[in-house]
Image (cartoon, rainbow, N blue to C red):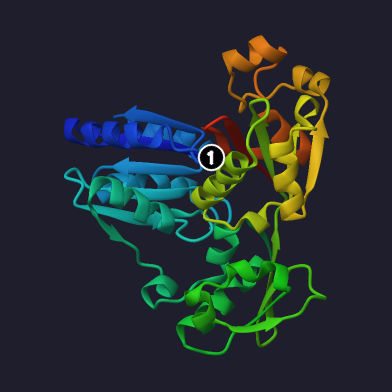
Amino acid sequence: MNIAILSVTNQGKKISDILFENLKDNPLILNVSQYHKNIIATVNDIFDKYDCIIGIMASGIMIRSIAPHVNSKLSDPAVLLIDDNANFVISLLSGHFGGANDLTLKIANILDSTPVITTSTDVNNKTGIDSIAKRYYCSLENPKNIKFINRALINNNIVELYLPRKYSFILDDNVKKSYSIHFDDDYDSIVSVIDDHKVILKPKQMVMGIGARKDILTSKVKNAIQHACSILEIPVSRIDFFATADVKEHEKGIIDNINELNKDLIIIPMADIKSYQNDECSKSDFVMKQFGVRGVCEPTALIANGKNSHLIFKKTAYDGVTIAVSLKD
């Protein structure tokens, strides 16, 4: 995720600095940029370039600045609004599919602020179908029907949810209370239905790249995988494939974990990693010295996932293991 923080006043800039320091090393955030003053011009330039825009200012300034650019809940960035004293963090735009509601809770926790979320499903303790799609990295088919599904949830009507058992990880307590659940392993997607209105969720392909020191312990690799997934707030079973470099293809600590998880391990030749160019990949001086490549976990995650993939979890080290995760658009 790429986040832009906008501020107007000196007090707002101080809050921006606090957020920057708290977010810059978060594995889920690839880039955090700060902008101060010149709000309308800045929004004109960046609106389509960031996944989330956080404005620290009066609501009128922020609303007037983003208004000409607002297009669709499926493509607009998440927009959060924070007052100059950080009393409130408000989810202003793209609360569900853009992830603004979840981000509002996290930012409010950092600032010890009151989160403000106004989407009807959330205030009625229901989980919208677009919230499920965002939370578990799914594509959406028939998005025009989202409003029918979510409206039915708010009105306490019975909304059917069909899914194969392999996707049962989406069924937290709130989802169970919101939908009538049906397991059907003939499905390869998640289908929500009310009357003749249907929304289909298809989990996007997710690949975890792994790098490790020589003779790494199996337990250390397991801990790294689990810790990364806990930050992503997904079960390990949500990962479709794992990937590593050919110099690590016989590393017992990696192999044991992949076998236990009953997943496939994609081996990427070092020659492919050396020639791979992607600005999302960071550089490790140690790996460059040892193997002549910028890194292992990030490029293997991206190469294994193919074209149109991007990082959603940047390289993070866990006691001799490095983890990165890519998602296919």
77 vs 38, left or right, is right
Residue extending farthest to the top is 289
Q: Tell me: residue 277, above or below residue 75.
A: above
- For badge 1, the amino acid type reads Asp
30 vs 36, left or right, is right
Q: Residues within 10 Å of mark 1 (few under 14, many from 20)?
A: some
Residue 238 shows in this picture: yes
Q: Give percent across and percent down for residue 29.
A: 48, 38
Q: Give percent across and percent down for residue 270.
A: 79, 21
Q: Residue at x 73, y 73 (%)?
A: 164
Residue 142 shows in this picture: no
Total marks placed: 1
Q: Tell me: residue 21, above or below residue 101.
A: above
Q: Give percent across and percent down for residue 231.
A: 49, 48
70 vs 38, left or right, is right
- Which residue is under mark 1? 48
Q: Residue at x 72, y 54 (%)?
A: 261
Near-viewer residue (227 or 301): 227
296 vs 72, left or right, is right
Q: Residue at x 42, y 57 (%)?
A: 102
Near-viewer residue (217 or 87): 217
Q: Give percent across and percent down for residue 76.
A: 52, 50
Q: Tell me: residue 260, above or below residue 124.
A: above
Q: Tell me: residue 146, above or below residue 318.
A: below
Rendered image quadrant of residue 194:
bottom right
Q: In the structure shown, which secondary structural element does the residue marked by tag 1 occupy?
A: loop
